[in-house]
Amino acid sequence: MTTTVHVDLPGRAYDILIGPGVLSQAGARIAAMGGRRHVCILTDENVAGLHLAALQTGLADAGLTSEALALPPGEATKCWAQLERSVEWLLAEKVERGDIVVAFGGGVIGDLAGFAAAILRRGVRFVQIPTSLLAQVDSSVGGKTGINSPSGKNLIGAFHQPSLVLADTALLGTLPARDFLAGYGEVVKYGLLGDAAFFDWLEAEGPALAAGNMDARVRAVTRSCEMKADIVQRDETEQGDRALLNLGHTFCHALEAATGYSDRLLHGEGVAIGCALAFELSARMGLCSQEDPSRVRAHLRDMGMKVDIRDIPGDLPDAAGLLDLMGQDKKVLEGKLRFILARGIGDAFITSDVPRETVLGVLEDALRSGPPRA
Ligand SMILES: NC(=O)c1ccc[n+]([C@@H]2O[C@H](COP(=O)([O-])OP(=O)(O)OC[C@H]3O[C@@H](n4cnc5c(N)ncnc54)[C@H](O)[C@@H]3O)[C@@H](O)[C@H]2O)c1
Ligand SMILES: O=C(O)C(=O)C[C@@H](O)[C@H](O)[C@H](O)COP(=O)(O)O
Ligand SMILES: [Zn+2]
């Protein structure tokens, strides 16, 4: 039940292996990549406790020694202090230019370790072994690496492609339900941005996928990676089409900043809320039918996910405050916000032609309506 998606970038091509048990291939695959027979692993404390021994045993079976640094779990780890700690540790381990760094964890570890690899000795190779659903469907692929700044999300970083991605879907068995559903937010994003049939399939199979059906999990990870690979091949550094992968993210990143990158809001939860808002905005601008945002919201609700801004516990800035936070979005061009909007499910596009008043209206209504905040 293993699938392979190839990311065909000139001089930087790599495979994504997807399926239960692919972790056991880590030793042989990494040994075949050359370099010293010693591997440095960046991970987090949760993943280390559950799965590090299996990874290190597999590496040892292939004749590779390894050392690991386990960082605190959570979004707050994507910061200067943990980046410095990681880079200094890799230097203390005497990682050479030809060596392989392994990112073993969710998107936080993948983004941080990838950035550390990008800047260490001006760039060393790294392998992504994503362990969360979000990391398997999105963050381990495409080479966006980086950390957050108090000024905004992912504002410090680099494009640095991995040399290999091993997405072992069996590891998702230990992922907490909340983190699984957050990752599902990015899965839904793919259907919404460019594949209506995939969204139809998710409406039917989402519950089985969440309940642990392995075929459904492999299919969802594979389709998501295919779509991401296709877009990244067209536009590696987001000069155009790659921004489609940012559907829902202008809202999401403002909400993550507003909640202090804390567990009040996980990234994938913000993506789901942001996608619902992007469809609402599209409907209000007459770009898609009113049924589309309703259908998006209904599916997120059916899956037991956060759907509305009001599902976020605690206080938030007002609509103008959120709009202000959006001003740090990397898609801003000549001071003007750009949004990913949709003509329908599976038909997203990029535009800067969005009246400020309409965005404010959507945010004001979202902050006002819905269930009371916890
Ligand atoms: N680079 C990109 O293209 C890209 C794309 C999407 C998201 N991201 C980034 O990814 C991050 C979110 O990633 P995430 O949702 O994986 O968060 P995460 O890395 O914080 O992982 C979520 C939680 O699950 C735990 N965990 C991971 N795998 C586990 C497993 N198999 N069993 C048990 N627990 C496990 C982690 O310890 C953590 O507590 C955000 O910082 C976001 O900005 C980056
Ligand atoms: O890979 C991309 O491109 C994406 O936009 C994927 C997003 O899911 C991801 O959250 C990404 O990190 C956001 O990028 P940013 O450039 O808006 O920080
Ligand atoms: Zn994202």
Image (cartoon, rainbow, N blue to C red):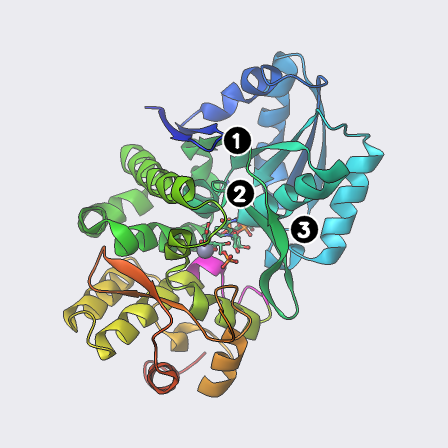
Quadrant in the picture for residue 370? bottom left
Q: How crowded is mark 1: few (under 14 residues within 10 Å), some or many (20 or more)?
A: few
Q: Is residue 324 magenta?
A: no
**Amino acid of disc 1:** Arg
**Which one is in front, 344 or 257?**
344
In the image, which is nearer the foreground, mark 2 or mark 3?
2
Name the quarter showing ligand 3.
bottom left
Q: Name the residue under label 2.
A: 143
Determine whether, in the image, residue 128 is placed left or right of residue 179.
right
The first of marks 2 and 3 along the sequence is 3
Marked residue nearer the N-terminal end (1 or 2): 1
Q: Name the residue under label 3.
A: 72
The residue drawn where x is 30% and y is 39% is: 223
Instruction: Work out whether residue 364 or residue 336 is closer to the camera in this orientation and state it.
Output: 336
Q: Residue 220 at what x, y percent from top left?
A: 31, 41
Mark 1–mark 3 distance (CA, rounded to whole Å): 31 Å
Q: Are marks 1 and 2 in contact (CB under 8 Å)?
A: yes
In the rendered structure, the answer to whether residue 119 lies left or right of residue 131 reads right
Nearest the viewer among 54 and 258 is 258
Identify residue type, mark 3.
Answer: Pro
Residue 75 drawn at (x, y percent): 59, 57
**Residue for point 30% across, 61% down:** 349
Task: Name the residue beneath numbered marker 1.
Answer: 12
Residue that extends furthest to the right in the rendered view of this protein: 92
Q: Is the magenta stretch mostly helix, strand or loop?
A: loop
Q: Which amino acid does label 2 sit on?
A: Gly
Q: Give the range drawn in magenta.
A: 261-269
Which label sits in the foreground, 1 or 3?
A: 1
Task: Label 3, secondary structure: give it.
Answer: loop
Ligand 1 closer than 8 Å to label 2 CB: yes
SS state under label 1: loop
